[in-house]
Amino acid sequence: MTCCMHWRSAGVSLLLLMALWLSACLPLTAQPVADETPGALMATPTVMTTNTPPAATAALPVFGSGRPTATLPPEPVPQPGQYVNPGLGVTFTYPPTWTTEPGEDTQTLTWLVAPSGRMFVVVFYSPLAADTDLEEAALQAHDAVAEEITVAERSAGEPITLDDGRMAWRNTYSGRLDNGSTIRLVLTSTARGGQLFTFMAFGPPGDIEREQTTLDTIVGSVTLTAPDIYGLPRDQTLVQLGGESTNPRDYDPAQGSGDSLVFSGLVTFNPQLELVPDLAAGWDISADGTVYTFYLRPNARFHDGRPVTAADVIYSWERAADPATDSNTVLTYLGDIVGVKARHAGEATQISGLRALDDHTLQVTLEAPVPYFLGKLTYTTAAVVDRANVESGAEWYRTPNGTGPYRLIRWERFRLQLYERNDDFYLEPPPIRFIAVQLYAGVGIRMYELGDIDLTGVSLFNVERVRDPRDPLHADLREGVNMCTSQVRFDVSQAPFDDPAVRRAFALAVDRQTYLDVVLRGVGVAARGLYPPALPGFNPDLAGLEFDPEGARQSLAASTYGSADRLPPIVFTSSGFGSDAGSSVAALAQMWKTHLGVTIQIENLEPNTYYDMLHTGEHGQLFMYGWCADYPDPENFVDVLFHSEAQQNLGNYANSDLDALLVAARTEEDGAQRLKMYQQAEQMIVDDAAAIFLNHSLSFVLVKPHLQNYVLTPIAVPIERYLAIDPALLAE
C-alpha cells in the first residue's frame, strides 16, 4: 500500500486517525500473534525517541531589582519514566522501557509506546464545560474518539480513584478497523480547572489485557496541580495573550502609547471611573483654575529604587513636547499648559508653565481654566520616564525603568513579555505577582477554552456563540458599552472632498444599518453622530444624515463636479497588507459604487505605522479612523478631533463658527450649559458632513472565575493592578 495522506490538527478525533494511519501505512512484521488477527496492528512503528517535556521548577525565580535582566530558571532534566508538563500542571509516570513521542497537535500531550510496538497510550486534553460533570464529559469525549472504529462492544463505564484521591472515569470499547483488524480502546479521563485530561490506550485486545496492570499504574500515577508558566507558579501568574509591534513609537509614553503596567502618571482612573491620585498624593487648584500644584508621594520610586521628583515630571513632559520626539499626542493632552506649544514648535527649550517648587512639589500653569485638565493627565503622554533610561539607547523601551505597579523583567521577541510585581510600588502592591503575556501564541478564544490564558476579548465571529446561555463560555462573559466611534474621515484639503456637497453625497450613500448587520454581524450601535451612547453629552435626538440614495445622487449632482464621472480618482486608505480589502472598506466601496456610481481605489498601509502615516498626511482623500474616549468628556471627541488647530484633526477640517463654539465651551463653568454647547457642536459637524460616523462598538471579554476583581470599563483603565487570583477556584 502506498500512503499519501497529509494530516493536519483536527482535535481529538485526529488521535484515532493517527492510529489508523499507523495500522495502514507502516510495514508489517513477520511475527504472527496467535490470538489476534494478523495485519495492521502488528505494524512496527518508526523509530521513536524519548520525549523530554518541560519540567517544573521547585523554587520561584529570583529577579534583580534593576531593569529587566531576568533569566528564567533552567528546565531540569526529567527522570526516566516521568512525564511533567508544568504549564498544565500534569505529571505521571510510565515504565522506563516504554518510549515516548510528542503530540502532533496542541491538545495532544504525548504518545507512549509499549516495547512491543503494538500498543499505544495517547494523552490529550480538551475543554470541560462548566455545566458538565466528569462522567458526562468523559463519555462524550470517549464516544467521539470511538466513532473512528466500528464498535462491537462498549463497557458500561466505571469510576476509578487515582493514587492522589482524584476521581476519574473509564470506558472500554472493542471493535474493528476498516481493514478488519480487531482493536480495543481503553479511555480514562479526569478533570481539573475546566480541562478534561484523557488517557487513551489502544491496541490488539490481547495486548491490552496483558498490559492492563501497567495501564492502571500509568493512569493511577496522574497528579493534577495548579499549572505554572515559564517556571512560575500558576496561582501567582496572570496569563494573557498579546501581540508585538515593530514600531518603537508604540512603546514610548511620549507618543501616547507606552505600557500602563510599567509607567504611571500623576493621576489615574480607578475601575469605577473615579479620577484618583497616582504618583501625586494630592493637588491644589488656584481660584481662577489656571494653576495646579501637585504634591508627589515621598515614597514614589523608579523600579531601580531612585526617588521620583518634580524634575522627573518636568523632564518627561518637556521630552514629549520636544520637536525631536515628534509626538502625535503631546498637544492634545498637554497643550493647555503654558509653553508646551512653544516647546513643540521649537521656539523654546523649556516649558515655561512648569516649575519645581521643591523635589516633591510641581506647579503647573495653564493658558486658561479647563475643567477636564486632570482627565487629560491620565493619558500615557503624561507618564513619567527616567532620563538615564530613555537616553541609554534606541531600544531603551525594551528595558524600561518605570514607576508603575509592575516591572518588565523579560521580553523575548514575538514570544513572551514577563512582568513582576513592583513590591516597592508607592500604592498597595498588586495582589498578583507575575503577568505573562504570550505573544502571538494562538487564537484567544481557543486558548481560553483550554485554560492557557485567564481572559480574552471576543471577536465578532464568536459573539453570537458566547452570548448563547447554552454555551459553556457564557457564564464567563462580560459584556458592556464602550466609548468608541468608528468613522470614515474626509481629507477636506483634497479634491473632491473640499466640496461639502460631495461629502454629503458620500455620507447619504452609506447604509449604516446594513453595514452593522453584515460587516459587524449586528453587534454594536449604528452611529448618527460623533458621541457614543455612554458618553456625557450623547444626544439621542441628534438629526443625522440618514441613508438616502436619491438624496445622495442629488447632492452629487448639485456639487461643483456635477456627476460621478467628473470626480478625480479617489483613494481610500485603510490599515492592512497588500491589496486585500477588509470587509469594512469593501462594503463601503460597494455602497458608493452602487448608489453613486463612484469607483474607489483602496490603499492599505502597514498596520504598525498606519497612524503615524495618517499624521504625516500620507493617505488618500478618505481613510478609516476610530476614536475611543481617554476621559469621559465630549471635549475629548469634538474639540480633539475637529477644532481646526487640533493635533488629531487629520482631515484638515476647518469651520470658524465651530472653533469659536469649542473655545467658549472649554471654559464654560455651568456643566449643563457646557454639554449643550458640545451637542450643538456635534450637530454642526454632522450637518457639514465633516466625517461619516459608522458605528459605536460594544466590548466582550471572557474572564476566568478564578480571576477576581475584574471590572469591564467603558474606557481604558490600568485594571491589572486591582486583580487577584483565587487559588481554590483555579484548582477546581
Image: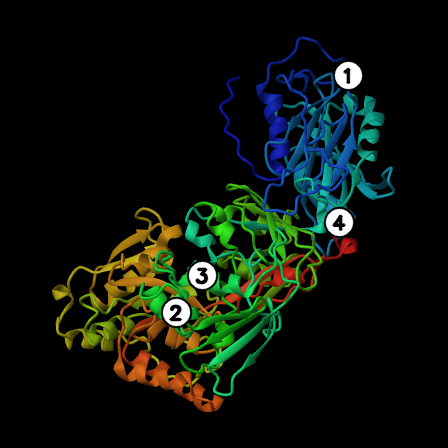
Q: Residues within 10 Å of mark 4 (few under 14, many from 20)?
A: few
Amino acid at dot 1: Asp
Q: Secondary structure at mark 1?
A: loop
Across and down, in percent, residue 732 comes to 77, 52
The tag earlier along the polypeptide, 3 or 2, is 3
Q: Secondary structure at mark 3?
A: loop
Is 16 left or right of 524, judged from the image as shown? right
Q: Secondary structure at mark 2?
A: helix
Mark 2 or mark 1, which is nearer to you?
2
Q: Is residue 181 shown to the viewer in this render? A: yes
Q: Which residue is mark 2?
A: 340
Quadrant of the rendered image containing residue 267? bottom right
Mark 2 or mark 4, which is nearer to you?
2
Q: Which residue is mark 4?
A: 136
Q: Which residue is mark 3?
A: 256
The tag earlier along the polypeptide, 1 or 3, is 1
Q: Which residue is mark 1?
A: 35
In the depicted structure, whether residue 268 falls above or below residue 125: below
Is 643 left or right of 197, judged from the image as shown? left
Amino acid at dot 2: Val
In the depicted structure, whether residue 358 falls above or below residue 684: above
